[in-house]
Image (spheres, grey):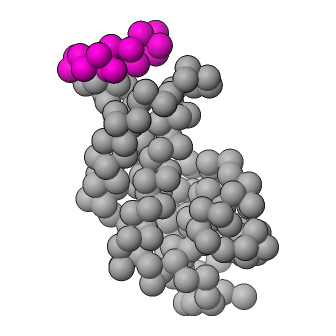
Amino acid sequence: MDHQKLVKDCLKGKVKAQRELYELFAKNMLGVCYRYTRSIKDAEDVLQEGFIKVFRNLDQYKNEGELGAWVRRIMVNTALNFLKRNRKYQQEMYFTQEYLHPVVDDDPAIRLNAKELADLIRQLPHGYQVIFNLYAVEGYSHVEIGELLGISDGTSRSQYLRARNLLITWIENFSSGKKKEKYAGK
């Protein structure tokens, strides 16, 4: 598919091209949005707002780099702005020690696949989850994360390491079939 032509047609206001652009990226971008929200409804709201920004700013895409990466960056930034604006997420974004929910599974013979790993990441406290996703999944640096979230890069590093260590512990316990315990942030 020629993304350059698709972008040009979208900029000309061709509805078919706009629909094609949306359909090309919507499914994957919904997954990106869902990684930062707590519900599919919120993820859909972020997706819609993100695509409005994509179409509004499409003239700024300079055909440098992949179109999908440009759209993804808009979706991540839109999701972060959504988290900052919504009260129910603001409280969860504080980077404090908090009660962590245990991973629960009655089957001791667990094989961790991508969906199960994503489910484990979603069980992290929201602040840990956001930083883990930005660093490990999206590839942002700790300096960039600090700027995006208004925290120091040291805080980003420490929260990432705590999230990572917690995930490792959960995966080890999950895989070995040990009795699940309630974990507390350390």
Predominant secondary structure in magenta?
A: helix
Instruction: Specify whether residue 21 is in view.
Output: yes
Between 97 and 184, the one nearer to me in the picture:
97
In screen coordinates, is 71 left or right of 156? left
Identify the residue at horizontal 68%, vertical 66% (top origin): 146
Between 101 and 87, the one nearer to me in the picture:
87
Query: Residue 52 at what x, y percent from top left?
Result: 31, 41
Query: Does the stretch in magenta take in 155?
Result: no
Stretch in magenta: 1-17
Identify the residue at horizontal 55%, vertical 20% (top origin): 63
Query: Residue 147 at what x, y percent from top left?
Result: 65, 63
**Which quarter of the rendered picture does the C terminus lie within?**
bottom right
- Specify the quadrant of the image occupied by residue 110: bottom right
Between 166 and 180, the one nearer to me in the picture:
166
Instruction: Specify whether residue 105 is in view.
Output: no
Query: Residue 148 at what x, y percent from top left?
Result: 60, 62
Q: With respect to residue 148, does 58 lie above or below? A: above
**Which quarter of the rendered picture does the N terminus lie within?**
top left
Identify the residue at horizontal 25%, vertical 24% (top origin): 19
In screen coordinates, is 123 left or right of 11? right
Between 113 and 140, the one nearer to me in the picture:
140
